[in-house]
Image (cartoon, rainbow, N blue to C red):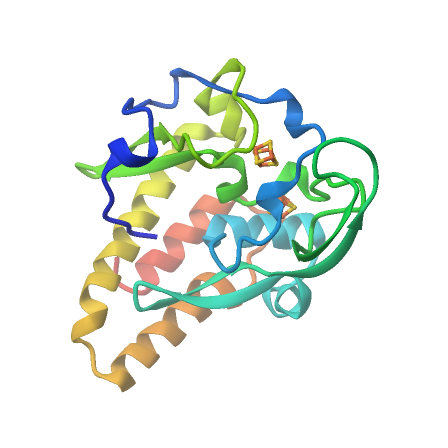
Amino acid sequence: MIRNIELSEISDGKLYDAADMAKLGVGDCAGCHSCCCTMGDTVVLDPYDIYSLEKGLGKSFEELQKENIDLRVVDGIILPCLAMKSKVQVNGTGEGASQREDDACSFLNEDGRCSIHTFRPGFCRLFPLGRIYENDTHKYFIQVNECKKERQTKVKIKKWIGIPDFSEYEKYVDDWHYFFKGISERAPEMEDGQLKAVNMGLLKTFFIAPYDIEKDFYPQFYERMSRIGF
Ligand code: SF4
Ligand code: SF4
């Protein structure tokens, strides 16, 4: 999602690279599941997330749409996002743990934990980090007002996000961001019919067409990019 905001308003003003240490550790979020509820349609998913969900759950995009994901418009372009409409009775003790959640992510379990932790989406992995894009790449910043707990321990950012082949992942993140930015900048000038066709093409190409979960994600993603002329 492309946002124009003053970094100083939401961060400590520092920018980080993947190899940098940052104060992110929060004791495994014990007793808190705040950022897995009432997030509306803000947890936007990218093609890597959909590949990971298809692989981890053995579900197609259409099956994910029944319970786990919704579609929303981001900067004029339709993208999938996590659905926050499950009703979950979260058991246990601790801050925010014993309560009924009516607007929870479908992957939040009754222990207040993420049931897909090992293949959770990039947005969830990143939190409370954000990315700022400049000069065809990105840096990270800490969103200081987002987490309910005080961050206590320093963790290397690459380890925090925890995705294998991290250099390849970061290159993909940049490529997807700038591709999306290019299209969304052109979206306001498009006629309704053209924008609809573009949206259908993007949805089918990057999300609805199933990924081969036996194969690596990146060659499949770049083959799809080249197919639509990028
Ligand atoms: S996928 Fe997991 S970490 Fe992300 S919002 Fe849902 S329950 Fe929380
Ligand atoms: S608000 Fe902070 S402590 Fe609570 S679940 Fe989210 S990241 Fe963890």
- From the viewer's perspective, is 73 left or right of 98? left
Q: Residue at x 53, y 53 (%)?
A: 39
The quarter of the picture where residue 59 lies is bottom right
Q: Residue at x 28, y 77 (%)?
A: 195
Q: Position of residue 136 (x, y in %)?
A: 21, 39
Is residue 209 shown to the viewer in this render?
no
Q: Please, which residue is most extreme toward the bottom here?
A: 193
Up the image or down, 52 lies above or below 230; here it is above
Q: Position of residue 166 (x, y in %)?
A: 45, 29
The total of numbered circles placed on residues is 0
Q: Please, which residue is most extreme toward the right here?
A: 92
Is residue 165 shown to the viewer in this render?
yes
Ligand 1 falls in which quarter? top right
Q: Position of residue 199 (x, y in %)?
A: 36, 73
Q: Residue at x 20, y 72 (%)?
A: 188
Q: Position of residue 115 (x, y in %)?
A: 73, 44
Up the image or down, 101 lies above or below 66; here it is above
- From the viewer's perspective, is 29 left or right of 93? left
- In the image shown, does 173 or 25 lie closer to the viewer? 25
- In the image shown, does 126 or 10 lie closer to the viewer? 10
Q: Quadrant of the C terminus?
A: bottom left
Q: Residue at x 79, y 42 (%)?
A: 98
